[in-house]
Structures are given as structure tokens and as C-alpha cells.
Image (cartoon, coloured by chain):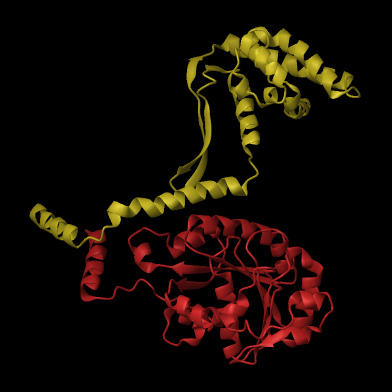
Chain colours: A red, B yellow
Amino acid sequence: MTGRVIVITSGKGGVGKTTTSANIGTALAKSGYKVVLIDTDLGLRNLDLLLGLENRIVYTIVDVIEERCKLKQALVKDKKNPNLQLLAAAQTRDKTAVNAEQLKEICETLKEENDFVLVDCPAGIEQGFQNAVAGASEAIVVTTPEMSAIRDADRIIGLLATKEEITSVKLLLNRVRPSLIKSNEMMSVDDVVGILEIPLVGIIPEDTGIITSTNKGEPIVNDENALAGKAYRNVAQRILGEEIPFLDLDEPKGFMAKLKNAISKLKVKV
Amino acid sequence: MSLFSDLYNTLAKFFRTSDEQIDASKSVATNRLKLVLMQDRTNLTPKILEQMRSELIDLLSRYVELDKDLLDLNFEQEGNQVALMLSIPVIRAKDEDEIEAAIKEHEKAMIAISQQNDENESDENSEIEESNDSSEIINAEEDDSTDPSMDISSKSMKNKDKKEVSAPEEIGNNPFKSDNMDLSEILETSLEN
């Protein structure tokens, strides 16, 4: 089997790369696919925390590269889903401990026995980024509807365009707040897509549930009721090639809101 | 009809979401972002922009007398497009004779530069600069007094800056300093063709 290697990147930090990696990985594994998540943020590893696997890590990616263990020994199986495995980053080393060629080799090996290899990229555009994208053939660029995040995403998209191996670059818009978009205080999905000009793979609403799910070390896709969880499950479906409509986040809730909405639409006609 | 529309407007105002009042925040962000990305995506560094500006001044001042200090070159947001805006404060239009003379002077200077260039090709850079200075003095009469900050090539020659400030009529704003040689070369070859 030859799996797909997808890098999850953003340029800017704190926009939700790791959360996205954990959730897409979990959702794909729940759909029955074999998934390996690689944390390439050496020295600042967090993917283990989001998955609740921090206590199970024995070997890291640096141990594999420096041949202190076999690749299979370093893979940590998820608590709930054996289809999902994590290759953790080393916490005591920095980005220079790994080079692009070594990461590419690991991806090549892992994709032989898995359907998906998801690479969680560190923030920035230096060595860590170059390492993370080395083995990938697809990329998901995570951004939020904020100027600084969009600018950095644009830079990343430009850099990804120079990588011949990467054939698909898609946008995941995270932390969208429909109420702010509605009152024109936040850039809308269309605004962001219009600026970055790459196809959209997901729109994730801001959800306080993310905080509690991180606290518990359990990705929000496992919560059937959470809106962000549903949005991430949709992203996984789209990665699998299904045509899933984007969640309608603008729907007004109360009676008054509906009335207001109807009247503001009327206004245009007169 | 007007009664109805008045009534409608009053009602609409009551129900209206506060779109209009806070519209600014989002569109300001979008516009600022478009502008900054435009600059990020091109390779137009401030230095290159400044060079573009000084070359434009050289070109335009052959045809009109303009206020070089107030000439403004910037990227601006025009509706959905980013435009390169050039604002040129014109002091007065030159008449035909003046324009012709300026163009001839320019061509002469280019030929002189290229000849000097050929002669000095094997020489060191410092010598090229020196020989260019002599041609500047020949052309000084034609040129207006200059602001040293305008000309990027003068920035790279700090000693000369001072000279230009103190005696602008002695050394004019000559476009053919060493930094601009490439352009004159290109222009010349295209003329030959």
C-alpha cells in the first residue's frame, strides 16, 4: 500500500496546526484508515498532549534517526483507536537534530504500511518547515481570519509552490466566528479565500469545546455534539474525496434574528 | 410612494443590524492585507522602488518641469485592484524646443556614457565613477538642482552627497551615475535595434 503524506502547516504559530493534525488524524482513523501522525516540532512537542499520549512516549523521532530504536518501536498507538499512531518529537533537542532527507526517508517508510501520514509542521519558515514538507506530496495550510495569520499563510503558500513534490495545497480556515463576520468585524471566509486563492478544505468555527478537549487530551472529533468536531469530521471526509457541503455557520438562531435577517434582505430590493 | 418609503426606512433603521457603523474594521483589514501582500509577493524592495522613482523623474523631467520633492510613487488600493499610483506635481510644461533639446542632451549623454563604459570596461569601478562625474558636469546646465535623498545612486556615494547639498548647481541630478548604467545600456541597445 502507498499512503498519502500530508503536511499541516501555517507559518504563524498558534493558529491551530497541532489541534488540526490531532483531529484530522483521529477522524481518519475512526473511519477505518491507518494513520501515523508525525510531530516535527522538535523541542516544542505538543501533539502528544492533545492526543493524551504524553505518558506513553518512550522513543522519539530523533531516537529513530540516530538509530537508538527501530521506527516501529517509536510509534505510539492511540488509547482508543489502534489505527492511529504517533511518532513524537524529541523534547530535549532542537531542529538541527533532523534534516530534510532523514524525514523524507521516514515518510517513505511509513507510507508503505499506512493510508495516511500526517506531518505536524512547526511554526516558521526555517529548517523545521523545510524538514516537515520534505516527504509530503500534499499540504493543508491552516490560518485564522486575522491579518497576521493570513499574511504568513500567503508566504507559506508561496514557498510550497516552489516544491515540486507538493501537488495539492488546500486551505483550512480555523477559529471562524460567525457573529463577528456577520457584524463585519472579521474577514469572511470568502474574503480569505479571495486573498489566498487556494481551494478550501475546511471551515472550523471557534469552539470553547477545544479548550476542554485539550485539557482532557481527547480530540474534539470524538465529541459527537461539538460543532468544531463536526467540522473536523467533514474535513476528513473531504480529504477522502467526498463532496461535503461546508457548515452553514451564519444561520440566525432566534425569532428576532430571523426577522432582522429577512428585513435586511428586503432592504436590497427597494 | 414617498410616504411608504419613509415608513419603510424608519422601520428598516429599527431592524437594521449595525453593519454600516462597524463596516470599517473588516474592510480596513482586507484592504491593508491586500496591499501588504501585493508588496510581499513582488520583489519590489524599497531600494528598487526608489530606483524606479528616480528613473521616472529623469524620464518625465525631459518633457515637463516637475516638483521632484513632491513626486509621489506608491501602491494604493483602488476598489478591488491594487494600483501603482504616481502623482506628479507639474510646475510648467516645457515647449517643443526645450523638449527636443532635453531629448538630444539625453541621447548625447547616453552615447558618451556608453563610450566611456567601453573605454573603462577593464578598469576598476572607482575610475568609472570618476569619469562619469566629468560627464555630469558637462550636463549640469541642463539639470535642475537636486535633492540627494532622491537619487539612490548618490546614497551609495556618501562623500558626494555633501557636495551635492552644498553646491547643487555644480553637480546636477544626472541620471547616469554608475548605479543607473544598466538602464542606459539597455536603452541604448534597444535604440540601436
Is residue A226 left or right of B54 when viewed as pictured? left
**Residue at coordinates 71% horizontally, 26% vertically from top-left?**
B156
Residue B104 shows in this picture: no
Query: What residue appears at the point 71 percent right and 72 percent down from the top-left corner?
Result: A136
Looking at the image, the residue that sits furthest to the right is B122
Q: Can you tell which quarter of the image residue A268 is in?
A: bottom left
Q: Is residue A227 left or right of residue B167?
A: left
Q: Dividing the picture into quarters, in which one does residue B58 lie? A: top right
Farthest residue, direction left:
B3
Q: Is residue B159 visible?
A: yes
- Residue B122 at x, y percent in the picture: 91, 24
Image coordinates of residue A116 in percent, x first then y, are: 67, 82
Indicate the position of residue B14 as horizontal and vertical percent values.
16, 60
- Toward which corner of the image does residue B13 lie, by quadrant? bottom left
Residue that appears at 62% across and 60% down: A157
Q: Is residue A126 above or below residue B136?
A: below
